């Protein structure tokens, strides 16, 4: 893999729209109704969300977003790596970028929700490697056996 370029994305391109549509479809296939917390394209365009896509040349490798929760904390959203590039470090590069931006914004904490099902084990392992710890639900989330919540102090 050559140099991965992480770019702030305005979410207007066809490639990212298709990628996110596939992400939502997969989340709805894996996760029971009412337990899918992935954001759709319009919600990701909200002013409180910054979205990045990762590219190698003209190939979309993955994406991730940072949603501002308040002046001192954010939530990681829409982390996804293209199937053909899983296990190659793409998610680590995106996560490192999000953590760096959160620190630049003087956030004290990053939070996230991810799935509790076996399909989400690689995501949970990634977050654990980067120092995220399990926590209770935050914000508008409620206890859900299909979700786990994690946090990292910055």
Image (tube, rainbow, N blue to C red):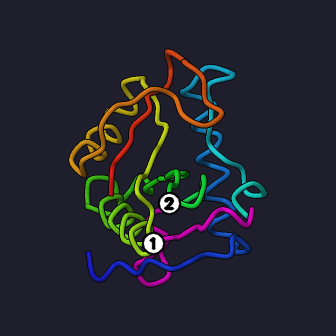
Q: Quadrant of the N terminus?
A: bottom left
Q: Earlier in the sequence, mark 2 or mark 1?
A: 1
Regarding mark 2 in the picture, which secondary structure is present there?
Answer: strand
Depth check: 6 or 145 in front?
A: 145
- Residue plotted at (40% across, 81% down): 5
The residues bearing labels 2 and 1 have C-alpha atoms spaced at a distance of 9 Å
Q: Residues within 10 Å of mark 1 (few under 14, many from 20)?
A: many
The image quadrant that residue 27 belongs to is top right
Regarding mark 1 in the picture, which secondary structure is present there?
Answer: strand
Relative to 136, is 74 above or below? below
Q: Which residue is mark 1?
A: 54
- Residue plotted at (58% across, 67% down): 51
Q: Position of residue 97 (x, y in %)?
A: 38, 70
Extreme residue toward the top, this view: 145
Depth check: 141 or 9 in front?
A: 141
Span highlighted in magenta in the image: 46-63
Q: Which residue is mark 2?
A: 64
Relative to 145, is 131 above or below? below
- Residue plotted at (24% across, 47% down): 131
Q: Is 62 within the magenta?
A: yes
Q: Is 92 within the magenta?
A: no
The image quadrant that residue 30 belongs to is top right
Q: Position of residue 62 (x, y in %)?
A: 46, 62
């Amino acid at each position: 893999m050559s140099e991965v370029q992480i770019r702030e994305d305005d979410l207007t391109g066809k490639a990212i729209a298709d990628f996110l549509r596939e992400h939502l479809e997969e989340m709805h296939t894996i996760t029971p109704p009412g337990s899918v917390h992935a954001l759709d394209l319009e919600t990701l365009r909200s002013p409180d969300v910054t979205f990045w896509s990762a590219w190698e040349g003209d190939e979309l490798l993955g994406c991730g977003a940072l949603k501002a929760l308040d002046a001192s904390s954010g939530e990681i959203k829409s982390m996804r790596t293209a199937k053909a590039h899983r296990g190659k470090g793409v998610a680590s590069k995106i996560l490192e970028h999000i953590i760096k931006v959160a620190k630049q914004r003087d956030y004290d904490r990053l939070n996230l929700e991810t799935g509790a099902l076996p399909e989400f084990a690689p995501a949970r392992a990634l977050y654990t490697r980067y120092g995220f710890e399990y926590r209770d639900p935050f914000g508008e989330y409620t206890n859900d056996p299909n979700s786990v919540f994690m946090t990292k102090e910055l």
